Image (tube, coloured by chain):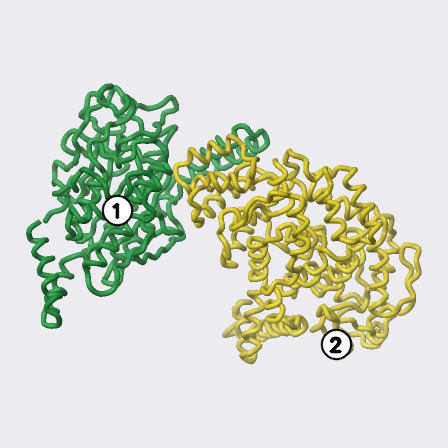
């Protein structure tokens, strides 16, 4: 912390010195935000944190989700209490080699259960939906621009349109890959519900799905798409001219029914994307931070259709060459609330004990060598909780 | 459906990007008749850019000939005997002077540009009822690409032979549409020659002569069967043959010696008097003594006013707007209107707008894929897509304009479009379109696009969607979007 502060003081001082001090800011720039990368992966639809990182050490878990326990046989264990979903194998390996950590029982300030409102809050960084108009990732770019010389940092949405999280005053561009992993299975399930009450469309749709099932592939093309998206993100971020901040969205996490298959399929896609990105970043992985987050968690219990409904606290993933993970044991940042009836939020959801905003602000501040308090105030104004420290190796 | 929703979707292409739902639906539709722009600047620019059809056709034909010659020459050379057709075309292209080479490359891109132009005009239109009528009539006078030259003329056919007449006289549209180069090519008229014409007699003296060798009845038959009287319209084979004789001489430039002997028409077509069958004609019991190019025109004028034509047009129009099985009372009213006004299409449109049958609250039609795509792009505000993507989407949906499987045009009944696979394709495409859209509040957009007509299941599914994009995709394939 002190070193960061003195570096900034040095930077400010050298600017005041004028031309004679030019060598110093360049050095500071090189060590600061200038070469550091941030990739934000937004999981739209509320990815189930309890499936992502199962608290198998909690006796309550078997009671709530006993049927899914066999899924975690042989899965990577973190803190000997949590098990990483086996479909997240590469991310699990990164966690047990100290290059990734998980955050659990975390939530934004939002306590209702609407996807749209929750995503709005997660993207804007406001304390209420629609209270703030620009995105916190854009404000982060603005903060970096204030603190570095030269042109503005390149911020990029890997999407056909710029998501709210990146929208705002700071210049942003976007690039749409031809093949983003699609949430087509989920859309198709919802279309079935949409046509439920329509005899003509319902019958046409049922026949369409029969044919589709016969011709179904094994999901490999979806995985290939996910890997391609990861490689694309890396190719857009490598080198001095690359984007320093990028964002990518993955849908398909709203698993109200038959969650085991649906979640595994989505998780494999996320895992393939991250693995491909990490490989393609090469040496730059050292200076790269990847944040994976979702708008809220899901109900602690499974519902009657093998799925979970909209909940509260969930998990997030922090990856990168500079992340302060734990080799061997793995590291999970969590103030575990427990899974007993009385411990659950409104007796149904995992209770939020960590502010997701504190994790996000703390991680980007440490990674980009920004002042944590300023970062928190700019990105997530009006929060009582301070930014978390110790996420990155100093 | 509410009247406002009917005006938007049944009569138009759905709510546009910066539009509000009409408060007085009938007045809103009637106003479109006054605001319609038959020749928007994008079309006049297009016409100027691809001006002379004759030159383009001549170029395409000479390229085809050169390509064939190159391939034949290559076949005799052991070194390059395996030259492909593409190679032969490149070789022929290299032989062209640069300005013609550029023109040829342009001509090959024209079709996709014209399709995109048609779609984008409809997507951005403030007079969507009129765009619907343009597309209805273009399908009535359907031209399909395939024959050499149709790809560069079919867009012009819709833009200059259909568009200017949708509120004019049916007879004017009939003449413009059937004697346009695209139709003359598509229905083989360009090679039809009168058996007693001077051209044919001279040909008899030259046993090895190339080119047209006699009468072709295709266009005459389709005008009677599809464009005017209808299949049971009371004409005989003798009428078809006589009409075909009257049409001889109508051809396109760039063919054989047509350019030397022909007289260029404003449409870009060519009338070659020496190929025209001499003498008076007798069609449907009437004698036509008009000569040359005016003979076919005189017959077309009569056909345009025929009671069978009135019934045929009234039936198709009623089917398009009021249901696959057109209400007989509406057909009768449109038919009477057609006969009373001599085929005034503006009057017919007003009668349709006033007709109670067109305001039936339950949806009466399943949207065709083309209608659905245009409505989806309007709803989502995804405008000015590049030609490549528009053509890809329409190909995926199986409804590319000007590619109907027969001269009868694309079908206008649900049974032809409401299939399982077709539905799946719309769902897939909806996902792609929604990805490109930037709509903040899907529920608000849905309520605006279907005023007072959004169903609870659709509203619920939109509200439950995991993201705005998914909500939008669901709206695009909702029953409200699929039917009108």
Give the percent coordinates (x, y) of residue A197: 54, 28
State how many labels appear: 2
Residue B405 appears in the rendering: no
In the rendered structure, the colour chosen for chain B is yellow
Chain letter of the residue carrying label 1: A
> What residue lies at 71% left-to-right and 65% top-to-bottom?
B181
In the rendered structure, the colour chosen for chain A is green
Give the percent coordinates (x, y) of residue B121: 58, 57
Q: Find numbered disc 1 in the image and state the secondary structure of the residue it sits on.
A: helix
Query: In the image, B296: left or right of B479?
Result: right
Give the percent coordinates (x, y) of residue B401: 62, 54
Q: Find numbered disc 2 in the image and state the secondary structure of the residue it sits on.
A: loop
- Seen from the viewer's position, the closer of residues B209 and A195 is A195
Q: Is residue A57 above or below residue B183?
A: above
Rendered image quadrant of residue B484: top right
Residue B91 appears in the rendering: yes
Rendered image quadrant of residue B8: top right
Q: Does the CB distance between marks 2 and 1 fall below 8 Å?
A: no
> What residue lies at 27% left-to-right and 60% top-to-bottom?
A242
Query: In the image, B215: left or right of B443?
Result: right
| Residue under numbered circle 1 | A275
| Residue under numbered circle 2 | B257
Give the percent coordinates (x, y) of residue B67: 59, 72
> What residue lies at 56% left-to-right and 75% top-to-bottom?
B92
Q: Is residue A245 above or below residue A42?
A: below
Judge the density around disc 2: few (<14), some (14-19), many (≥20) Cα neighbours within 10 Å. Answer: few
């Amino acid at each position: 912390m002190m070193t960061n502060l003195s570096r900034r003081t040095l930077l400010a001082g050298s600017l005041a010195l004028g031309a004679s001090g030019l060598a110093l800011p360049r050095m500071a720039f090189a060590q600061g935000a200038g070469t550091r990368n941030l990739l934000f992966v937004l999981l739209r639809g509320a990815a189930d944190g309890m499936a992502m990182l199962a608290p198998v050490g909690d006796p309550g878990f078997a009671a709530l989700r006993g049927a899914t326990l066999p899924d975690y046989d042989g899965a990577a264990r973190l803190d000997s209490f949590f098990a990483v979903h086996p479909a997240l194998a590469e991310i699990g390996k990164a966690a047990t080699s100290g290059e990734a950590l998980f955050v659990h029982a975390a939530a934004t300030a939002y306590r209702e259960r609407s996807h749209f409102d929750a995503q709005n809050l997660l993207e804007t960084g406001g304390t209420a939906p629609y209270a703030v108009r620009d995105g916190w990732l854009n404000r982060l770019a603005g903060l970096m621009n204030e603190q570095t010389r030269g042109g503005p940092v390149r911020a990029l949405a890997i999407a056909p349109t710029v998501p709210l999280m990146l929208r705002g005053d700071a210049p942003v561009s976007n690039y749409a890959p031809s093949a983003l992993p699609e949430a087509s299975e989920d859309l198709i399930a919802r279309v079935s519900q949409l046509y439920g009450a329509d005899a003509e469309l319902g019958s046409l749709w049922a026949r369409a799905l029969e044919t589709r099932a016969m011709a179904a592939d094994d999901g490999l093309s979806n995985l290939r798409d996910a890997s391609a998206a990861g490689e694309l993100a890396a190719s857009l971020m490598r080198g001095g001219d690359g984007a320093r901040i990028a964002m990518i969205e993955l849908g398909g996490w709203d698993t109200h029914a038959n969650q085991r298959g649906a979640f595994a399929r989505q998780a494999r896609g996320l895992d393939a994307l991250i693995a491909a990105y990490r490989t393609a970043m090469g040496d730059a992985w050292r200076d790269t931070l990847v944040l994976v987050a979702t708008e809220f968690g899901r109900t602690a219990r499974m519902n009657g259709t093998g799925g979970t409904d909209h909940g509260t606290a969930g998990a997030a993933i922090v990856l990168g060459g500079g992340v302060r993970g734990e080799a061997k044991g793995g590291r999970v940042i969590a103030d575990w609330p427990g899974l007993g009836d009385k411990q659950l939020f409104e007796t149904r959801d995992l209770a939020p004990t960590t502010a997701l905003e504190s994790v996000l602000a703390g991680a980007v501040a440490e990674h980009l060598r920004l002042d944590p308090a300023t970062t928190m105030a700019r990105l997530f104004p009006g929060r009582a909780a301070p930014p978390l420290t110790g996420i990155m190796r100093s | 459906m509410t009247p406002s929703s009917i005006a938007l979707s049944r009569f138009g292409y759905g709510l546009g990007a910066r539009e509000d739902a009409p408060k007085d639906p009938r007045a809103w539709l009637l106003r479109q008749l006054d605001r319609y722009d038959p020749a928007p600047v994008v079309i006049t620019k297009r016409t100027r850019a691809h001006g002379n059809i004759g030159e383009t056709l001549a170029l395409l034909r000479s390229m085809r000939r050169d390509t064939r010659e190159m391939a034949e020459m290559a076949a005799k050379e052991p070194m390059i005997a395996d030259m492909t057709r593409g190679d032969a075309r490149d070789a022929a292209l290299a032989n062209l002077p640069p300005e013609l080479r550029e023109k040829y490359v342009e001509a090959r891109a024209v079709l996709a540009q014209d399709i995109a132009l048609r779609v984008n005009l409809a997507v951005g239109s403030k007079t969507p009822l009129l765009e619907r009528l343009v597309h209805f009539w273009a399908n009535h006078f359907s031209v399909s690409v395939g024959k050499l030259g149709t790809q560069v003329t079919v867009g012009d056919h819709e833009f200059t032979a259909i568009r200017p007449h949708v509120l004019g006289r049916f007879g004017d549209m009939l003449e413009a549409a059937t004697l346009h180069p695209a139709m003359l090519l598509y229905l083989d008229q360009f090679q039809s020659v009168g058996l007693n014409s001077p051209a044919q007699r001279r040909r008899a003296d030259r046993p090895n002569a190339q080119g047209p060798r006699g009468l072709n009845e295709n266009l005459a038959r389709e005008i009677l069967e599809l464009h005017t009287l209808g299949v049971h319209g009371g004409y005989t084979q003798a009428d078809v043959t006589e009409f075909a004789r009257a049409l001889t001489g109508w051809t396109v430039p760039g063919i054989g010696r047509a350019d030397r002997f022909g007289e260029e028409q404003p449409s870009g077509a060519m009338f070659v008097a020496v190929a025209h069958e001499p003498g008076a004609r007798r069609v449907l019991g009437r004698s036509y003594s008009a000569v040359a190019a005016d003979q076919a025109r005189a017959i077309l004028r009569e056909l345009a006013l025929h009671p069978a034509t009135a019934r045929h047009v009234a039936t198709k129009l009623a089917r398009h707007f009021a249901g696959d099985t057109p209400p007989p009372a509406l057909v009768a009213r449109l038919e009477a209107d057609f006969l009373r006004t001599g085929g005034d299409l503006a009057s017919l449109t007003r009668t349709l707008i006033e007709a109670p049958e067109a305001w039936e609250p339950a949806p009466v039609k399943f949207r065709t894929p083309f209608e659905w795509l245009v409505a989806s792009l309007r709803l989502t505000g995804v405008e000015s897509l590049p030609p490549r993507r528009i053509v890809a989407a329409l190909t995926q949906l199986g409804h590319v304009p000007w590619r109907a499987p027969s001269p009868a045009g694309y079908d206008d009944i649900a049974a032809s479009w409401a299939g399982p696979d077709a539905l799946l394709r719309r769902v897939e495409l909806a996902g792609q379109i929604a990805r490109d859209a930037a709509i903040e509040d899907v529920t608000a957009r849905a309520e605006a696009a279907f005023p007072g007509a959004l169903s609870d299941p659709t509203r619920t599914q939109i509200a439950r969607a995991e993201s705005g994009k998914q909500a939008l995709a669901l709206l695009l394939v909702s029953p409200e979007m699929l039917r009108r």
